[in-house]
């Protein structure tokens, strides 16, 4: 398979990337992040846990707590609000409100489970966008984990899975300069910005940057920026 893909790519043909598929299982992803993920709909299919047919029991539902709420000193208030949502959700179910209507209460923070099957071409495309520092932190962490899972089975295939600024992708950052400077790869001058490349070209110079390393990529997901609260956990 690896020979098939890379030999064809060397010849300039990218169509083999659409003929290779991978299936992943994801648990504990917030609905806020899954709503972003399912916007990708070419070369990828999903099977997601239903909030209509699956009803949470005893006022408990799993949810994600962003680290920013912790830093703001509002974790307790956040947890209290989620607990109240769970209580009202459970009250509604016991009063005869069907799960498909009780779910209207559930927030974007509610966790979901899903599986998806994606071809290699779309896997690369999603990495272009979702491994970028500007992507929302949760989906960035999730796609980094998908890349790690791919790397564990097929290390060679994981090499071109980079944010779009990677040396095997676009090769430079095309985001606004202010955002580029916020990114660990830009702030450390690991990747070049398009404005620098254009300016150098006008001056008759060529700029080059080093290939991205695994250490470089780890800067994009420095640590979990969230906490998963499971059902039946206070």
Image (cartoon, grey):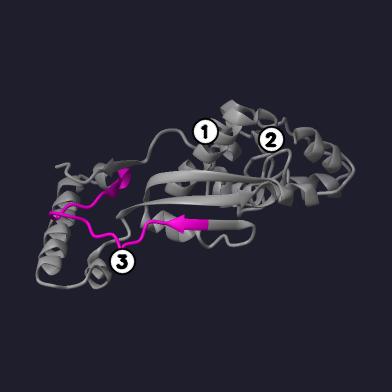
Magenta-colored span: 46-68
Q: Are dots 1 and 3 in contact, CB under 8 Å? A: no
User: Any mark on residue 157, and which?
Assistant: 2
In the image, 35: left or right of 160?
A: left
Cα separation, mark 3 vs mark 2, equals: 38 Å
Residue 167: image quadrant is top right
Cα separation, mark 1 vs mark 3, equals: 38 Å
Mark 2 or mark 1, which has the lower sequence index?
2
- The x, y position of residue 180, in whole percent, is 58, 46
Q: Mark 2: which secondary structure?
A: helix
Q: Mark 3: which secondary structure?
A: loop
**Image quarter in which the N terminus is found:** top right
Q: Which of 54 and 83 is in front in this view?
A: 54
The residue mark sitting in front, 3 or 2, is 3
Q: Which of 97 and 203 is in front in this view?
A: 97
Please name the residue shown 57% across and 60% down the image.
40
Please name the residue shown 42% across and 47% down the image.
138
Q: Using a 10 Å C-alpha cutoff, classify the residue at mark 1 as few (fewer than 14 neighbours), some (14 to 19) or many (20 or more).
A: few
Q: Look at mark 1 in the image and give the residue it sits on.
A: 219
In the image, 32: left or right of 83?
A: right
Q: Report the magenta stretch's main SS.
A: loop
Cα separation, mark 2 vs mark 1, equals: 21 Å
Q: Look at mark 3 in the image and give the residue it sits on.
A: 52
- The x, y position of residue 158, in whole percent, is 65, 35
Q: Nearer the viewer, residue 173 or 85?
A: 85
Q: Using a 10 Å C-alpha cutoff, classify the residue at mark 3 as few (fewer than 14 neighbours), some (14 to 19) or many (20 or more).
A: few
């Amino acid at each position: 398979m690896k020979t098939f893909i890379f030999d064809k790519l060397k010849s300039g043909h990218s169509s083999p990337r659409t003929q290779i598929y991978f299936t992943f299982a994801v648990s504990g992803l917030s609905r806020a992040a899954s709503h972003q993920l399912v916007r990708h709909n070419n070369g990828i299919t999903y099977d997601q846990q239903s909030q209509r047919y699956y009803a949470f029991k005893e006022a408990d539902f799993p949810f994600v707590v962003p680290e920013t709420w912790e830093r703001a000193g509002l974790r307790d208030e956040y947890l209290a609000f989620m607990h109240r949502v769970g209580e009202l959700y459970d009250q509604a179910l016991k009063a005869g409100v069907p799960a498909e209507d009780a779910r209207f209460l559930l927030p974007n923070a509610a966790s979901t489970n899903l599986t998806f099957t994606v071809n290699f071409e779309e896997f690369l495309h999603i990495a272009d966008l979702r491994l970028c520092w500007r992507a929302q932190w949760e989906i960035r962490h999730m796609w980094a984990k998908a890349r790690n899972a791919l790397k564990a089975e097929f290390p060679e295939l994981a090499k071109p899975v980079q944010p779009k600024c990677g040396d095997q992708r676009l090769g430079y950052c095309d985001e606004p300069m202010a955002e580029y400077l916020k990114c660990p790869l830009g702030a450390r001058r690991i990747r070049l910005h398009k404005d620098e490349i254009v300016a150098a070209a006008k001056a008759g110079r060529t700029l080059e940057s080093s290939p991205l390393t695994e250490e470089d990529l780890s800067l994009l997901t420095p640590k979990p920026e969230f906490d998963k609260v499971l059902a039946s956990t206070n």
